[in-house]
Image: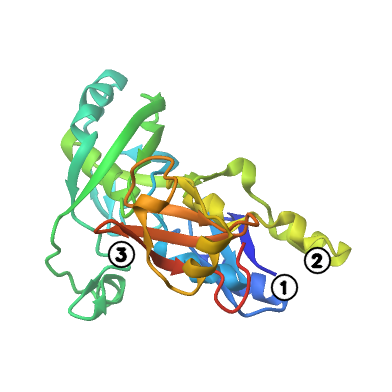
Amino acid sequence: MNGILCMYKPEGFTSFDVIAKLRGILQMRRLGHAGTLDPMATGVLPVFVGGATRACDILPNQEKSYLARFALGYETDTQDSTGTVTNRYDRQVTRQQLLELLPRFTGRISQIPPMYSAVSVDGRRLYELARQGVEVERKPRTVTMDRLELRQFDEASQTGTLFLACSKGTYVRTILHDLGRALGCGGVMTGLERQSSCGLTLEDCVTFAQVEAARDAGTLSELLLPVDRMFAAYPALHLNPAQSRMYRNGVKLSLDRLTLPEQSEKYRIYGDTGCFFGIGRTEEGLLRVDKNLTAGEDAS
């Protein structure tokens, strides 16, 4: 069994908890996930099943989108509502003040990873240091915020909802923390739902209950999405029988002899039977195997 299970991660589960529970349901060990979510977060969590796990480390850096709930007026050590309050503010802001600030957090922006994160510094995870009461200097990171929209804001309670579409590696709770700082009133994330990741959306999601029901009915394969869904950002390149044989044997193919749909550094490669081979990379006029997803077993 190979493919993608687009799981709806429930609140309170770590991403690894989802994998552990699925291993029990499916009675298989070879599972992996893309894009870690905090325990308080819900939503899209792509899970790779069987041979599809070979694709985990080559996913394109595609945009992810979120719906985040927030509260203004205080800060915590975790930058979300699960942490210990570190500062409180009397200042209240208006919806208009929030709207006027959002453009400053759109486009290429710099953010400092929170202490409660999986980022490593000198071989130690930041969250391990934070739990020991240790705070260390973190280097700023550049991330891209393509869309940042205020969906709702209640001035009386100073709570609201933001929609975000951003690059991989963006810390949403840090965005809300930094917004609060810029407004002079503090801010924390109170809830988060990932609505899309790697081209998968909430409409693709299934629950643990659905997976269990499909297992019992013998219809698990109907829940699996094809691996190439995760690589839709790359153009599709179809090979003829001779090219397919050479490519699968690791032979570099001349680009002059291929029918390229468009110019690209990487392509989704399909054999003459329509089987998804994996990802090919172009260099110096040649197409070479970047990742073979058919080695040993079919991952299509």
Q: Residues within 10 Å of mark 2 (few under 14, many from 20)?
A: some
What residue sits 17% from the left and 69% below the top?
A: 135
Q: Is residue 108 left or right of residue 73?
A: left
**For numbered disc 2, what is the local secondary structure?**
helix
Instruction: State which tag comes first along the sequence, 1 or 2.
Output: 1
The answer to whether residue 203 is above or below residue 152 is below
Which residue is outermost to the right?
Answer: 217
Q: Amino acid at mark 1?
A: Leu
Rounded to the nearest angstrom, the CA distance separating label 3 from label 2 is: 37 Å
Q: Which residue is mark 2?
A: 215
What residue sits 75% from the left and 60% below the top?
A: 221
**For numbered disc 3, what is the local secondary structure?**
loop
Q: Which residue is mark 1?
A: 26
Q: Is residue 108 left or right of residue 163?
A: left
Quadrant housing the C terminus: bottom right
Q: Nearer the viewer, residue 70 or 242?
A: 242
Rounded to the nearest angstrom, the CA distance separating label 1 from label 2 is: 7 Å
Q: Which mark is residue 116?
A: 3
Q: Amino acid at mark 3?
A: Tyr
Quadrant housing the N terminus: bottom right
Residue 90 horizontal/vertical position (percent)? 23, 35
Marks 3, 1: nearer the viewer? 1
Q: Residues within 10 Å of mark 3 (few under 14, many from 20)?
A: some
Q: Are marks 1 and 2 in contact (CB under 8 Å)?
A: yes
**For numbered disc 1, what is the local secondary structure?**
helix
